[in-house]
Amino acid sequence: MSKIAVLTDSHFGARGDSLPMQASMERFYNEVFFPTLDKHNCQVMLHAGDYGDRRKYVNMGTANFVERVYQRPLAKRGIKQHVLAGNHDIFYRYTNEVNTIEELCRHNDDVYVYTMPSEITIAGLDILMLPWIVDNNRAQTMTMLQSTKCPIVLGHIEIAGYQMFKGIPNHEGLDEALFQRFELVMSGHYHHRTVRDPIVYLGAPYPMIWSDYNDPRGFHLLDTETRQLEYIPNPYSLFVKITYDDKGKGHDYITGLVQSIMAPNSPHHDAYVKVIVKSREQPYWYDLMMDALYKVNAQDVLVVDDITVNDENETDELEEDPDVDTLTLMKEFVDSLSISCDKDELFAYLQAKYHEAIAASQSARVL
């Protein structure tokens, strides 16, 4: 064995079990993930948690999708899976014992689920497996971090100072000094991929919200001989932006735009689309573009009138203003609530909506 596939944060059921989201996932697995595993004859894969998206239940359609698109192809290839319980997988807050992975895969002998910190050996590699830290594994996790002789860690852990999403750092979590003695630390949880030796936040395999736009997604291969990680990018995205500017343009402008949208391999098909309007001097042309988007089943088409960008040299980079204080206030507010609810889940939901709102507000600039 020379290559092990490393995946994380698959979030099956994301966006409320959205069918376009499922189609985007299926394209990744069919056209990127499994062809890569076949090319390198991978027989083992590691999954660093957040296998599912919802903690409390799994939609029947999503369960069918997971079996058809993910589990069955893995079983057909005889690939053994080692999967961590992530925070989105666990039913209770204080224990990982009831979780999405075991409920969906309990009859699959090739799936090994880790709810407590464990040491395993794969192809001569000693790996410390660290699932999401909760009350009943916290003490054991901290002890094993100090005592293990494993040079490699796979975790679903929260380390302070890393970006959860592009431009959105998290200042809470474990001190990264705890991990400096290891040769390689691979973790899920944060969807933005970050490499800060020896820590690698692996990143999600596909974009799921607008904050993921233009932020690389994919998975990794771990070489069992060199112990090096190879990044395999996912070239596909569910989120597309169009800059509409018909000022001073001829009819070929709208003809070309409509043809690009309607093309068979256009990224606009079934995608979430933002239209950034810089000028709209030809209302009929604009209607032709919108009609083309609806014909290719574009999702939630959002139109933003851009009145701020006049400089032709304006870059396409997102201005990053994470406004961490707002997130801190949100967390404090949720923690202070006296109602009976899962506060971690509530904050995670509010956090995701906050990131989407930030991305929407900043799209008044051409991104």
Image (cartoon, rainbow, N blue to C red):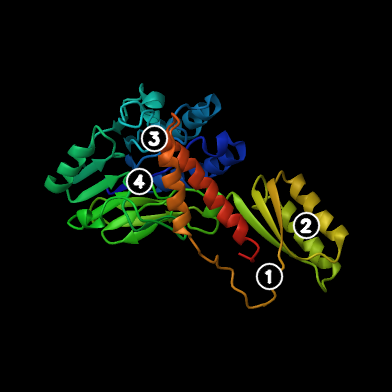
- Secondary element type, mark 1: loop
What's the amino acid at mark 1?
A: Thr
User: Which residue is pictured at 41% across the width and 40% down the height?
Assistant: 336
Looking at the rendered structure, the secondary structure element under dot 4 is strand
- The residue depicted at 71 percent of the width and 65 percent of the height is 306
The secondary structure type at the circle numbered 2 is: helix
Q: Residues within 10 Å of mark 4 (few under 14, many from 20)?
A: many
First in sequence, mark 1 or 2: give its number.
2
The mark found on residue 5 in the picture is 4
According to the picture, the residue beneath numbered tag 2 turns out to be: 258
Disc 3 marks which amino acid?
Arg
Label 4 – label 3 distance at C-alpha = 13 Å
Q: Are marks 4 and 3 in contact (CB under 8 Å)?
A: no
| Gap in angstroms between the C-alphas marked 4 and 1 | 45 Å
Instruction: Compute the Cα span from label 3 to label 1.
Output: 53 Å
Which sits earlier in the primary sequence, circle 3 or circle 1?
3
Which kind of residue does numbered mark 2 sit on?
Val
Judging by the rendered image, the residue that carries numbered circle 1 is 308
Residue 275 versus residue 47 in the image, above or below? below
Task: From this view, report whether residue 93 is shown above or below residue 5.
Answer: above
Q: Can the viewer see residue 120?
A: no
Q: Position of residue 30 (x, y in %)?
A: 51, 42
Residue 115: x and y in percent read 28, 32
Q: Are marks 4 and 1 in contact (CB under 8 Å)?
A: no
